[in-house]
């Protein structure tokens, strides 16, 4: 694995390796304290980020590497102020760092970056379609809970059109057997045709839902997302149906149904539900540390990863 760009590029074996390595890292973090000692990793974010940026920077620190960082790069970097191209930005960073983590609003940004990068590149989120490191931590959370990623029954809810996390996770789960999907969103917020076509091409059955009552009570995962108003433009929300997860909503689901959310949450999950053991979104966020450590180790120490399985 030279780069980490999109979940659809990964093989099932690569995902399994990353999940196992994530578990090793989570169980034995001290063994990895100096794994990347002497390395420099650049994080450059052209969009706001809290969890992704901080968890990558925490992962870098925990691996003993140094971090050089640009936050709000659209405003503070030459790309923002002077119109420097993605390609020139990446070529420049390759002279400063041993690996690059980038978030960018353009859908093709990661592909353009990788085309010119001479060091390992990690897509920290690109446009509306790809957020592979989020998908890995989502999958790790599900895998830890169920013990397997086969036969997953998942309901994806909220803003499926502009939210990149749900469609990235669907791409990852397509590598496993018998994934089933239920889609619950407001009108105009449905998955794009590209995602529906992907599910058809990969034999993933999906069901369109009008409310939580249409989701099977024994579903394994309810994956909730927020309305991505920063990408949706002028879309009106006045006719949106309330899709908030509350204690009442969750009464019909079983004890093994977990609720995930990539965060930040606005009001799509009531805080009253936070104390329910099925509410796993904050643990999900914490899982960003071992999974992103695993990604960096796999990219920069590939010859050593095999001995740690």
Image (spheres, rainbow, N blue to C red):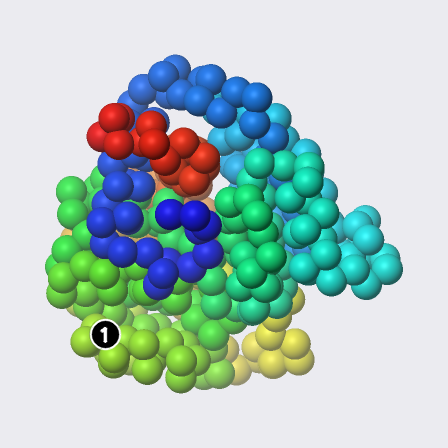
Left or right of 160 on screen, residue 196 = left
- Residue 303 place in picture, x, y as percent: 34, 32
Residue 37: image location, x then y, percent: 52, 20
In the image, is 132 to the left or to the right of 92?
left
Q: Residue at x 44, y 22 (%)?
A: 35
Image mark count = 1
Residue 287 at x, y = what percent?
38, 37
Q: Nearer the viewer, residue 137 or 183?
A: 137
**Pointer 1 local density, CA inside 10 Å: few below 14, some 14–19, many at least 20:** few
Q: Which residue is mark 1?
A: 202
Percent x, y for residue 247?
32, 53
Q: Quadrant of residue 74?
A: bottom right
| Image: 277 above or below 264 | above
Would residue 140 be seen by someone viewing this image from the given angle? yes
Q: Which residue is drawn at the image coordinates 45% and 83% (left, top)?
A: 187
Instruction: Identify the residue shown where x is 25% and y is 80%.
Output: 200
Residue 53 sits in quarter: top right
Q: Secondary structure at mark 1?
A: loop
Which residue reaches farthest right?
A: 82
Residue in the foreground of this view, choosing between 109 and 3: 3
Quadrant in which the C terminus is drawn: top left
Left or right: where 138 falls relative to 52:
left
Question: From the viewer's perspective, is 268 left or right of 208?
Answer: right
Q: Would residue 211 be visible to someone looking at this image?
A: no
Task: Say above or below: 8 vs 52.
Answer: below
Residue at x 61% of width, y 80% of height: 235
């Amino acid at each position: 694995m030279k780069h980490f760009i999109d979940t659809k590029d990964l093989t099932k074996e690569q995902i399994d390796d990353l999940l196992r390595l994530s578990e090793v890292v989570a169980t034995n973090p001290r063994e990895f304290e100096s794994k990347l000692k002497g390395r420099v990793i650049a994080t450059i974010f052209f969009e706001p980020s809290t969890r992704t940026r901080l968890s990558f920077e925490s992962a870098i620190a925990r691996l003993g590497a140094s971090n050089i960082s640009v936050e709000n790069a659209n405003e503070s970097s030459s790309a923002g102020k002077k119109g420097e191209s993605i390609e020139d930005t990446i070529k420049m960073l390759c002279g400063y760092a041993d690996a690059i983590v980038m978030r960018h609003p353009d859908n093709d940004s990661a592909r353009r970056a990788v085309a010119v990068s001479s060091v390992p590149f990690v897509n920290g989120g690109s446009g509306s379609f790809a957020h592979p490191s989020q998908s890995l931590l989502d999958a790790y959370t599900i895998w830890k809970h169920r013990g397997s990623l086969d036969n997953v029954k998942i309901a994806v809810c909220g803003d499926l059109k502009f939210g990149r996390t749900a469609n990235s996770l669907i791409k990852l789960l397509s590598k496993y057997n018998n994934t089933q999907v239920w889609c619950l969103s407001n009108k105009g917020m449905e998955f794009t045709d590209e995602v529906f076509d992907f599910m058809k091409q990969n034999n993933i059955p999906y069901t369109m839902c009008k409310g939580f009552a249409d989701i099977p009570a024994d579903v394994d995962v309810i994956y909730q997302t927020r309305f991505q108003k920063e990408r949706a433009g002028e879309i009106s929300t006045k006719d949106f149906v309330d899709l908030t997860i509350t204690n009442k909503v969750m009464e019909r689901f079983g004890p093994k149904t977990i609720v995930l959310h990539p965060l930040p949450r606005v009001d799509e999950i009531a805080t009253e539900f936070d104390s329910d053991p099925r509410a796993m979104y904050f643990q999900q966020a914490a899982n960003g540390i071992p999974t992103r450590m695993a990604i960096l180790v796999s990219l920069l120490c590939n010859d050593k990863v095999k001995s740690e399985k």
